[in-house]
């Protein structure tokens, strides 16, 4: 059976909540979401192929051992963990059929599995995301920051790590960027959608009864009040402070240096020069360099490991 997307449920994760996401990422979601919220389409069907579950485990013995899990490959002594697409707090927020959505919950589970795996010596986060939800991001980043004390965790930017994705990358032991990759967008967005004029045009009237001055803040059925605007800005200030101070702690930078980026998108060379990334190397070179540290057989083995690991980033 085709999977259906519950758009009002998705909207609750997009509007009136702080987002660690780029403007482009937010607008991409809105381009699909807003027309359907306006009644032009209520649901869409997703192809059957997208709903197929990934194989849980494929294992073989020896150094060429490959284990495959949802969002993670273990190749030899390296665990490669996928961090792709829009980042959400939990898998239940949006149907799993949307494979370019990745949850902090799943990423944390994979890291925990790699930490507990007796044969895994090092982890690699394969990053390509414009960010996502603020909720749950700090918790995952702190978990990574602590986990890197047990096993090295390398962030390979393949090819973008913006906003929430950079929050995650900053917590890793080191960040590797390629020539055309980008990092940054250390900032917060919150967008409110007001429908009152459209509702008036189509003849809809919503009357909301409530108790508590802040209870109806952010209602889409009327303009924002001054009090609601003030409350929203306070939430943004808190989320921004959390982001900038965390990146500064993880990367050993001054908080003001992080603030001074003004949420800009940094090129690879700029990021390395200013301390927001560590090394310039293509993704396949980076994974090969890591594999070579644990190599006891002929060099072609590292190519095999690289191919299996990077293949993860190409699968939907």
Image (cartoon, rainbow, N blue to C red):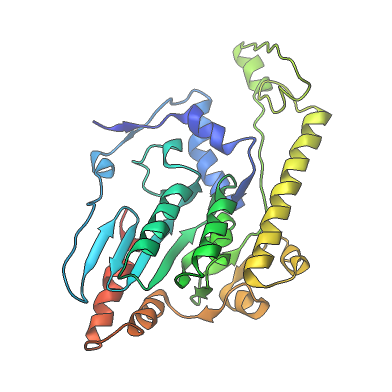
Q: Residue at x 77, y 35 (%)?
A: 231
Percent position of residue 223, x then y: 75, 25
Q: Quadrant of residue 1?
A: top left
Percent position of residue 71, x then y: 35, 55
Q: Quadrant of residue 254?
A: bottom right
Q: Vertical placement of 96 versus 224: above or below?
A: below
Q: Residue at x 52, y 27 (%)?
A: 37
**Would you say 122 lies left or right of 166 here?**
left
**Residue nearest the viewer, comparing 39 with 235:** 235
Percent position of residue 276, x then y: 62, 72
Q: Vertical placement of 212 versus 262: above or below?
A: above
Q: Residue at x 57, y 38 (%)?
A: 14
**Would you say 78 lies left or right of 282 here?**
left
**Would you say 115 lies left or right of 177 here?**
left
Query: How many tags in the picture?
Result: 0
Q: Is residue 263 visible?
A: no
Q: Quadrant of residue 307?
A: bottom left
């Amino acid at each position: 059976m085709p999977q259906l997307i519950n758009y009002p449920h998705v909207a609750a994760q997009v509007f009136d909540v702080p987002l660690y996401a780029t403007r482009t990422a937010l607008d991409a979601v809105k381009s699909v979401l807003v027309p359907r919220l306006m009644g032009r389409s209520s649901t869409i069907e997703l192809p059957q192929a997208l709903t197929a579950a990934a194989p849980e485990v494929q294992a073989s013995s020896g150094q060429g051992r490959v284990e495959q899990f949802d969002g993670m490959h273990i190749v030899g002594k390296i665990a490669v963990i996928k961090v792709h697409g829009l980042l959400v707090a939990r898998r239940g927020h949006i149907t799993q059929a949307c494979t370019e959505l990745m949850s902090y919950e799943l990423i944390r589970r994979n890291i925990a599995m790699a930490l507990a795996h007796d044969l895994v010596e090092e982890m690699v986060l394969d990053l390509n995301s414009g960010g996502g939800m603020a909720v749950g991001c700090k918790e995952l980043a702190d978990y990574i920051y602590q986990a890197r004390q047990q096993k090295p965790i390398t962030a390979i930017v393949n090819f973008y790590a913006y906003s929430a994705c950079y929050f995650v990358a900053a917590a890793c032991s080191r960040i590797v960027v390629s020539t055309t990759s980008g990092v940054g967008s250390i900032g917060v967005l919150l967008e409110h959608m007001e429908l009152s004029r459209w509702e008036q045009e189509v003849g809809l009237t919503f009357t909301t009864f409530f108790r508590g001055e802040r209870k109806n803040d952010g209602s889409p059925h009327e303009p924002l009040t001054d009090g609601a605007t003030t409350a929203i800005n306070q939430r943004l200030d808190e989320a921004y402070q959390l982001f900038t101070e965390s990146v500064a702690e993880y990367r050993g930078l001054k908080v003001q240096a992080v603030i001074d980026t003004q949420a800009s998108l940094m090129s690879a060379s700029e990021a390395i020069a200013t301390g927001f990334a560590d090394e310039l190397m293509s993704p396949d070179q980076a994974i090969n360099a890591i594999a070579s540290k644990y190599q006891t057989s002929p060099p072609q083995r590292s190519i095999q490991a690289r191919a299996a690991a990077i293949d993860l980033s190409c699968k939907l």
